[in-house]
Amino acid sequence: MDKIILFLARGLGSGLLKPAPGTWGSLLAMLLCYFIELFSGFSLASWWFILICAVLGIYICDVAEEIIGVPDAGEIVFDEFVGMWITLLAVPHHFGFYVLAFALFRLFDITKIFPINNLQKLPGGL
């Protein structure tokens, strides 16, 4: 079970890529969303799917943090997946809009402007 939790928490392995694992995780989340919707009509950026992932993600990230033994480890990028999908809710399904959304998401995730910076203080998977 630990291997499955770590695989998900690490964004299907994208969190192990260097440098900038959060960027790799966000990129994979964007591409998954784009191509799954393109070929299946199902959108990962739908509110109910994101809600389920967000709730499960709290557990996944909390357990992964315990397994790794490092608070807010950079390799845990499941939050980037959920955050990217939330961002994509607001844009039309067009690759150009997805790229712009990705760039803005990364800018805000890296700079962590107020009030986002306060979320870093939440414990565990939150």
Image: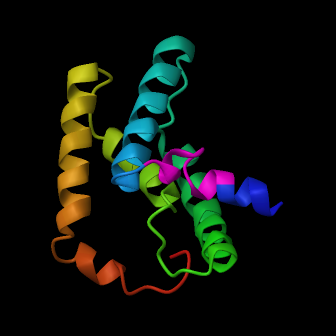
Image x and y of residue 81, in percent: 46, 49
Give the vertical position of 118 relative to 8 (above or below): below
Q: Which residue is farthest front? A: 18
Give the vertical position of 123 relative to 51 (above or below): below
Q: Which of these two is toward me, 109 or 42?
A: 109
Image x and y of residue 101, in percent: 23, 39
Give the vertical position of 119 relative to 64 (above or below): below
Q: Quadrant of residue 112?
A: bottom left
Residue beneath the point at 45% across and 40% down: 29
Q: In which quarter of the image is residue 103?
A: top left
On the question of residue 85 being in view, the answer is no
- Judged left or right of residue 61, residue 26 is left
Residue 14 is a magenta residue: yes
- Specify the segment rendered in magenta: 7-17
Q: How many labels does the image show?
A: 0
Q: Which residue is farthest top? A: 39
Image x and y of residue 113, in percent: 16, 71
**Quadrant location of the N terminus?**
bottom right
Image x and y of residue 2, in percent: 78, 63
Q: Which residue is farthest right? A: 1
